[in-house]
């Protein structure tokens, strides 16, 4: 959907929610004072992946749905890097749904920023896993038969320790949420409601202005049952914005014996020969 391409501008459609998300991510990185040489970003396939060329940091454009699996590997290889995954609902909840579930279970120290627009925008608007049952698209002219994925409930129930939802049209709050997600130790889901202005004529900016709302100040994100109840509001077409769930548990790499007590701990072993001798 390229329009107005130049070397410095992503090829997103004018008005796409990705523009707001891009500003949100850049601003959050800047305000957190992240060193670009200490950030590693895995991009999934899709319109969101177009950001790969426009964010300063180490980055990799992975295969369809494989960004989380790839970045779990890089995090284990170098757990000192701030590791972020940027993808769409199609890539991370559909093609990579299995990886998503297990990244949550492991509480891997990764922030997954998901552009949730209910369609596969890059390939012309086929229906994606978060679309409401009955949603009509070119690939489902009579409406989608399956029930939608509930990403917030899925992440919470599978062990993610930070789950937030933002809206691409609500930038000040989105920046704060992305900063909180990136600062969290453990698996953080930052689900962003992102209107695809070209292919999704249902979930528009106007739709979210009517159906999304900021969480009340009194809301307690450490209450698991309350978080699951908030996640279920999507079935009433209500979209809470804010930190839905937060828990404090050790991340995967903090519990992995090979890193904490044994061979590959950087603190314990700097001598490669010594590491080799452990195997013979
Ligand atoms: Fe265009 Fe939709 Fe892709 Fe945005 S998500 S660039 S509006 S096709
Ligand atoms: Mg999508």
Image: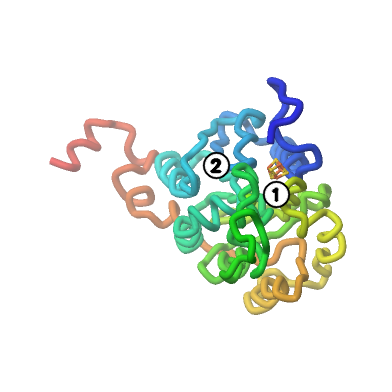
Image coordinates of residue 264 in percent, x first then y, are 33, 42
Q: Is residue 213 above or below residue 229?
A: above
Looking at this view, is 231 or 202 the one in front? Answer: 202
> How many labels sit on residues?
2
Marks 2/1 in contact by CB < 8 Å: the verdict is: no
Q: CA distance from mark 2 to mark 1?
A: 21 Å
274 horizontally vs 68: left or right = left
Per the rendering, the mark at residue 178 is 1
Q: Would you name the residue on which mark 2 appears? A: 45
Q: Count residues near mark 1 (Cα–Cα under 10 Å), then give few for <14, some for 14-19, many for 20+.
A: many
Quadrant placement of the N terminus: top right
Q: Is residue 211 above or below residue 4?
A: below
What residue is shown at x 81% (from left), y 64% (from top)?
212
Looking at this view, is 193 or 243 the one in front? Answer: 193
170 horizontally vs 188: left or right = right
Q: Quadrant of residue 189?
A: bottom right
Can residue 190 be seen in the rendering of this structure?
no
Image coordinates of residue 247 in percent, x first then y, are 60, 66
Can residue 57 be seen in the rendering of this structure?
yes
- Going from N to C along the chain, the mark reached first, 2 or 1, is 2
What residue is shown at x 69% (from left), y 52% (from top)?
180
Looking at this view, is 198 or 129 the one in front? Answer: 198
Q: Count residues near mark 2 (Cα–Cα under 10 Å), then give few for <14, some for 14-19, many for 20+.
A: many
Q: Quadrant of residue 231?
A: bottom right
Q: Nearer the viewer, mark 2 or mark 1?
A: 2
Image coordinates of residue 144 in percent, x first then y, are 61, 66
Quadrant placement of the C terminus: top left
202 horizontally vs 99: left or right = right
């Amino acid at each position: 959907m390229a329009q107005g391409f130049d070397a410095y501008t992503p090829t997103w459609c004018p008005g796409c929610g990705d523009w707001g998300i891009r500003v949100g991510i850049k601003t959050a990185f800047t305000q957190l004072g992240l060193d670009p040489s200490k950030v590693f970003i895995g991009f999934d396939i899709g319109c969101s992946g177009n950001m790969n060329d426009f964010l300063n940091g180490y980055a990799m454009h992975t295969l369809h749905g494989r960004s989380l699996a790839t970045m779990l590997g890089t995090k284990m290889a170098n757990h000192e890097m701030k590791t972020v995954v940027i993808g769409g609902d199609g890539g991370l909840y559909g093609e990579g749904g299995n990886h998503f579930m297990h990244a949550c279970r492991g509480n891997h120290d990764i922030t997954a920023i998901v552009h949730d627009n209910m369609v596969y925008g890059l390939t012309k608007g086929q229906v994606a896993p978060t679309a409401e049952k009955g949603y009509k698209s070119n690939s489902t002219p009579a409406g989608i038969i399956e029930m939608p994925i509930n990403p917030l409930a899925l992440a919470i129930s599978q062990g993610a320790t930070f789950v937030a939802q933002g809206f691409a049209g609500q930038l000040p709050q989105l920046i704060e949420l992305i900063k909180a997600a990136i600062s969290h130790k453990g698996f953080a889901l930052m689900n962003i409601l992102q209107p695809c202005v070209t292919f999704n004529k249902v979930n528009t900016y106007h739709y979210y202005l009517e159906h999304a709302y900021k969480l009340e100040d009194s809301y307690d994100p450490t209450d698991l049952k309350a978080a699951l109840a908030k996640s279920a509001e999507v079935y009433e077409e209500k979209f809470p914005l804010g930190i839905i769930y937060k828990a404090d548990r050790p991340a995967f790499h903090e519990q992995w014996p090979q890193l904490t007590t044994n061979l590959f701990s950087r603190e314990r072993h700097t001598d490669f020969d010594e590491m080799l001798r452990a195997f013979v």
